Image (tube, rainbow, N blue to C red):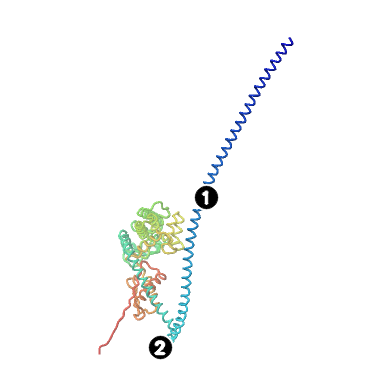
Amino acid sequence: MNSALLVIAVIIAVILIVVIAVQRVKYKELVRQTDKSMQDLREKESILQKEAMIKAKEALQTEREQLNEDERERRREFAQIENKLSKREDMLENKIQEITDKETELDKMKDKLIEKEDLLDEITQKRTTELERIAGMSTEEAKNMLLEQLKTELAQEQMQLIRENEAKIREDALEKSKEILSTTMQRCMMEQVVESTVSVVSLPSDEMKGRIIGREGRNIRTLETLTGVDLIIDDTPEAVVLSSFDPVRREIAKITLEKLIQDGRIHPVRIEETVEKSKEEVEQKIMKEGENAALDMGVMGLNKELIKNLGRLYYRTSYGQNVLKHSLEVGHIAGMLAAELGANVAVAKRAGLLHDIGKAVDQTQEGTHIQLGVELAMRYGEKQEVIHAIEAHHDDVTATTIEAVLVKLADAISAGRPGARRDTLEIYIKRLQKIEEIVNGYEGIRQSFAVQAGREVRVIVEAEKFDDLASQKLARDIAKKIEDELDYPGQIKVTVVREFRATEIAK
């Protein structure tokens, strides 16, 4: 049994030895294969490193060649730029040399010019001395004479330019303005009345005069006291004259007297009743005339007090012109002018109708009719442009709107056209005297005449003191002075007459 075990043990040992030998052989083979793989890997790595080095060298060589090419290109560009700069430098040097040569030449010419100037000054001084000796006057005197002559020539040229410009302006504007104004004036013609402070009441017989006077004059005193009107009963057959500067009072007295005459009952109580009825009738008439005027003008929204004051103008005259009709005419003319020029027609009409509204109260309140008119318009809510036109229509303030200018122009047209107004004799004579006084204030005036009812002044000047241009300037100066110092309706034409006569006697 021990032998068997020994054999088994030997066999197992042999097997183990064989197995170990086999495993060792396999291990060696594995190590060998591993070493070979490592060797292959090292070789591959070496090859890859060599290839990478080659590629890197190739890339570096390519980059180096590109850089070399760029450097060569830059060098070529720098060479070209350097060549151009060199050429420019050569050109600049040439130009500098030319400039230097020219400066040298100019210096020589300057020296020659200085010499010539000195020579010219010497010659000029000699000639000036000789001219002063020949002319008998100094250089300063000759300069003054030339300056005076130059001033005269410049003044003549100035007047010539003014005349040419005026002619051009008139040529451009006269035709259009004539067309607008003539069309407007032809479309609006109003009746005129003669200014009067008295009214005449016709009587059926002279017997009525005694009844109007009454016992111990009680009837006439009552009538005068209640109406504020003077009754003039004289030798005029079948007529009684009512005198008052208040046209409304005069109208009330006239209506009262006519009703009393028609009724036949004339005594203080009846007179008082009739006066009250006449006042009511006149008030109704005033409102009716004011409403008719506003309706005729197409002006809406007027305050009742303004309408009432407008109606009072029906009984008011100014220089022989009925103020209400004048206001209507101004409104129509201003509206038509505004339509022609593209301005606000409604404002122009409204301002034209109300421009003299202050004359309705100027006999009972202090202030000019312009101040009172502005106050009324402001009190009763008129617009600022209407108030401004009322305030500016007599140049109390400068007109700043086209509607205000048109109202001013329409007022002048209505008041200034022939037959529109009749001045009193005293005012008329004073105006003519003032015109001639203004004209005669200038030197060289031989005679002056105010003609055509003061619409033209003719000035006869001394021919030896005025030439054509000086005559034109004198006409302008006179016209300007008349505008500044004189108030007048319409226009005044200034005509300067210069007459030269040459007379010789044949012997």
Q: Position of residue 355 (x, y in %)?
A: 40, 59
Q: Nearer the viewer, residue 419 or 60?
A: 60
Q: Quadrant of residue 240?
A: bottom left
Q: Position of residue 116 (x, y in %)?
A: 45, 81
Q: Position of residue 33 (x, y in %)?
A: 61, 28
* Amino acid under disc 2: Ile
Task: Give the left or right position of residue 208, taking residue 45 as reference.
Answer: left
Quadrant where the N terminus sits is top right
Total numbered circles: 2
| Tag 2 residue | 134
The residue drawn where x is 41% and y is 51% is 301
Which structural element holds mark 1? helix
Q: Nearer the viewer, residue 395 or 463?
A: 463
Q: Quadrant of residue 460?
A: bottom left
Q: What is the residue that sits farthest to the right in this orientation?
A: 2
Q: Residues within 10 Å of mark 1 (few under 14, many from 20)?
A: few
Q: Position of residue 245 (x, y in %)?
A: 40, 64
Quadrant where the C terminus sits is bottom left
Q: Nearer the viewer, residue 415 or 34?
A: 34
Q: Are marks 1 and 2 in contact (CB under 8 Å)?
A: no
Query: Could one spot residue 202 in this view of the protein?
Result: no
Which structural element holds mark 2? helix
Q: Quadrant of residue 136?
A: bottom left
| Tag 1 residue | 67
Q: Nearer the viewer, residue 360 or 119?
A: 119
Residue 266 numbered mark, or none: none
Q: Residues within 10 Å of mark 2 (few under 14, many from 20)?
A: few
